[in-house]
Image (cartoon, rainbow, N blue to C red):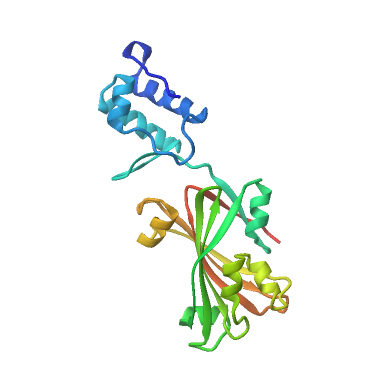
């Protein structure tokens, strides 16, 4: 429940008092992470201050990372940042267990197709070789965390996409082909703006940056088994690079 304020409650700089009150409520979980806040007009009426004062308070809270302002969409409580380690063995389920979180991964689409030049190069395949493409989305609780596009050698793993649709665990699916362990050979991380498709699925504004990772997974013999590109909602995750 939120509190109604009057001008007499707001001694001192009004914008700072509004900012302090909203900050306290957010920290007390009156508003959940990612929840949309009342409009600027509603907040001005509630605190009995001008819209200019409210706007100044909101700008301060956005600067502190307490809220985010998405033009055309509204005001939102900043999401809790999720630590996500990336190391020699990066496993989604294990990362969720580390932080006692409930994680879920869902396959959105899959296809068998001719790999482009970059994909075939990373998978050490001849140009134009067939690959299995799988697009999936990962959630923490009800919040989308990442959107991934993964590519696998089709000749080596026929039907892998069917296994992933039944159980989206890459580890479990690869074990069906005798790959009982695999490691991360390379991870590249960049920051960029999301595509319309990515912003829609991750439920973020097109102006909010994402963190993109490109990865190569190899089997114990060093043969590439997966090339993947994932984008993470930038204000929901902290990527932690762990040394082997």
Point out the residue furthest to the top here.
8
Point out the residue furthest to the front here.
166
Q: Viewed as shown, does residue 87 lie left or right of 58?
A: right
Query: What residue do we see at 56% from left, 59% from top?
Result: 105
Q: Quadrant of the N terminus?
A: top left
- Residue 122, x across and y down, in percent: 55, 78
Viewer-nearest residue: 100 or 237: 100
Q: Quadrant of the C terminus?
A: bottom right
Q: Is residue 7 above or below residue 196?
A: above
- Residue 70, x across and y down, in percent: 34, 44
Q: Quadrant of residue 194?
A: bottom left
Viewer-nearest residue: 55 or 101: 101
Q: Quadrant of residue 159?
A: bottom right
Viewer-nearest residue: 13 or 165: 165
- Residue 188, x across and y down, in percent: 54, 65
Query: What residue do we see at 38% from left, 62% from top?
Result: 197
Q: Is residue 239 above or below residue 54?
A: below
Q: Viewed as shown, does residue 45 lie left or right of 17?
A: left
Q: Is residue 172 above or below residue 144?
A: below
- Residue 218, x across and y down, in percent: 65, 74
Viewer-nearest residue: 129 or 168: 168
Query: What residue do we see at 45% from left, 38% from top?
Result: 65
Q: Quadrant of residue 163?
A: bottom right
Q: How many marks can you see?
A: 0
């Amino acid at each position: 429940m939120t509190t109604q304020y009057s001008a007499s409650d707001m001694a001192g700089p009004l914008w700072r008092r509004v900012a302090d009150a909203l900050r306290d409520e957010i920290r007390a979980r009156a508003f959940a992470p990612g929840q949309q806040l009342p409009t600027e007009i509603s907040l001005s009426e509630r605190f009995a201050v001008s819209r200019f004062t409210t706007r100044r308070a909101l700008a301060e809270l956005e600067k502190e990372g307490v809220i985010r302002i998405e033009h055309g969409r509204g005001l939102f409580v900043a999401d809790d940042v999720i630590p996500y380690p990336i190391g020699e063995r990066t496993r989604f389920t294990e990362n969720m267990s580390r932080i006692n979180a409930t994680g879920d991964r869902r396959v959105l689409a899959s296809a068998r197709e001719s790999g482009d030049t970059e994909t075939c190069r990373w998978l050490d395949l001849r140009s134009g070789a067939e690959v299995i493409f799988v697009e999936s989305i990962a959630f923490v609780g009800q919040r989308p965390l990442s959107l991934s596009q993964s590519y696998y050698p089709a000749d080596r793993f026929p039907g892998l996409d069917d296994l992933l649709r039944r159980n989206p665990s890459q580890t479990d699916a690869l074990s069906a082909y005798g790959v009982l362990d695999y490691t991360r050979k390379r991870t590249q991380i960049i920051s960029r703006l999301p595509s319309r498709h990515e912003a829609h699925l991750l439920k973020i504004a097109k102006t909010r940056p994402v963190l993109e990772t490109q990865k190569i997974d190899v089997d114990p013999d060093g043969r590439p088994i997966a090339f993947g590109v994932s984008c993470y909602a930038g204000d929901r995750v902290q990527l932690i690079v762990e040394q082997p």
